[in-house]
Image (cartoon, rainbow, N blue to C red):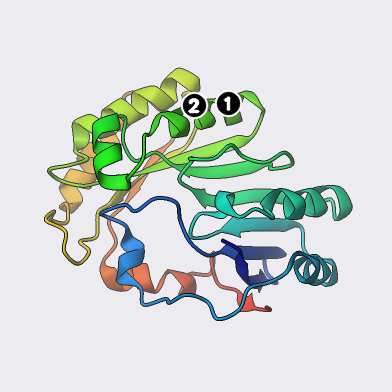
Amino acid sequence: MAMYKITYSKMFKRANIYNYGCNYNCTWCSYKLKNDGKPKKFLGVDRIKRILSELDIERVHFLGGEPTICSELAEIVNFAKRELGVYTKIGHSNGSRPLPEGIDAASISIKTISEKIHIEHAGASNAPVLRNFAEAYDRGITLDASSVLIPGLIDRDEIERIARFIADINTDIPYHIVGYLPVPNSPWRKPTPEEVKNAENIAKKHLKNVTSSHLTVKDFLNLRQNIQYRSVRVA
């Protein structure tokens, strides 16, 4: 797929570049709660470079969908890093693809340690995810991880297994646990605040920096209003 949107935060001097599409088909994906259709237009690499050059930025974040499936990602990252000298981050990724050279940081979703669950509910093996996460750390990329707590599927025991995996790499890696938001045609319920907090406390047995969130659907759909994410579309 291809990049289709750029937003800009003057406060944080940050450009956000969005890629359309994902190579996974997660049964619990919260994007199903949004009504975003396929973009009518996509952005060429030259236009992206020109826009980035014209903005007063110190950071470029790549988002999606899944940003790493964009064939032009490496070229844009290289331009942002080598030509503009800015900080580069994969704002969120499923970890299925190796991160390109020039990336400073990445937020990776580790859905499960169970390959069976990953194949059945994401459509692919999780072996590349676990391997790419470890390799990115070895390359010096600043990492943080997240998982969705889904009662009856990704439970607190699975969250603990994920925490142990991360801790085996470095106990300082930040880990965020998200309470599942039920999506259409899925059988799982939303966890209680107590269940999310309990999962957080279990993960803290292995990791030093664990946080959690328990959003409502309204909270999720209004995240862009949060000052941390607020930005203006420029392309």
Q: Does 214 sit above or below residue 116?
A: below
124 shown above or below 217? above
User: How many C-alpha atoms fall within 10 Å of the one at disc 2: few (<14), some, or many (≥20)?
Assistant: some
Q: Is residue 114 visible?
A: no
Q: Which residue is mark 1?
A: 135
Q: Which residue is mark 2?
A: 131
Q: CA distance from mark 1 to mark 2?
A: 6 Å
Would you call the spot at circle 1 few (<14 residues within 10 Å), some (14-19), or many (20 or more)?
Answer: some
State the residue in front, 228 or 106: 106
Residue 28, quarter of the rendered image: bottom left
Write down the quadrant of residue 210 in the picture. Answer: top left
Mark 1 and mark 2 in contact? Answer it, CB < 8 Å.
yes
Splitting the image into 4 quarters, where does residue 67 fall? bottom right
Disc 2 marks which amino acid? Answer: Arg
In this figure, what is the number of numbered marks? Answer: 2
Question: Which residue sits furthest right?
Answer: 83
- Residue 63 screen position, x and y as percent: 56, 58
Which quadrant holds the N terminus?
Answer: bottom right
Compared across the picture, whether 27 is left or right of 53 comes to left
Residue drawn at x 30%, y 70% as measured from the top left: 33
Towards the viewer: 121 or 84: 121
Q: Quadrant of the C terminus?
A: bottom right
Can you give x and y, in whole percent of width and height, for residue 113 in the image? 31, 30
| Residue 107, label in figure | none
Residue drawn at the location 33% of the way across and 69% of the way down: 219
Residue that appears at 36% across and 64% down: 31
Is residue 228 at all visible to an observer of this figure?
A: yes
Q: Secondary structure at mark 1?
A: helix
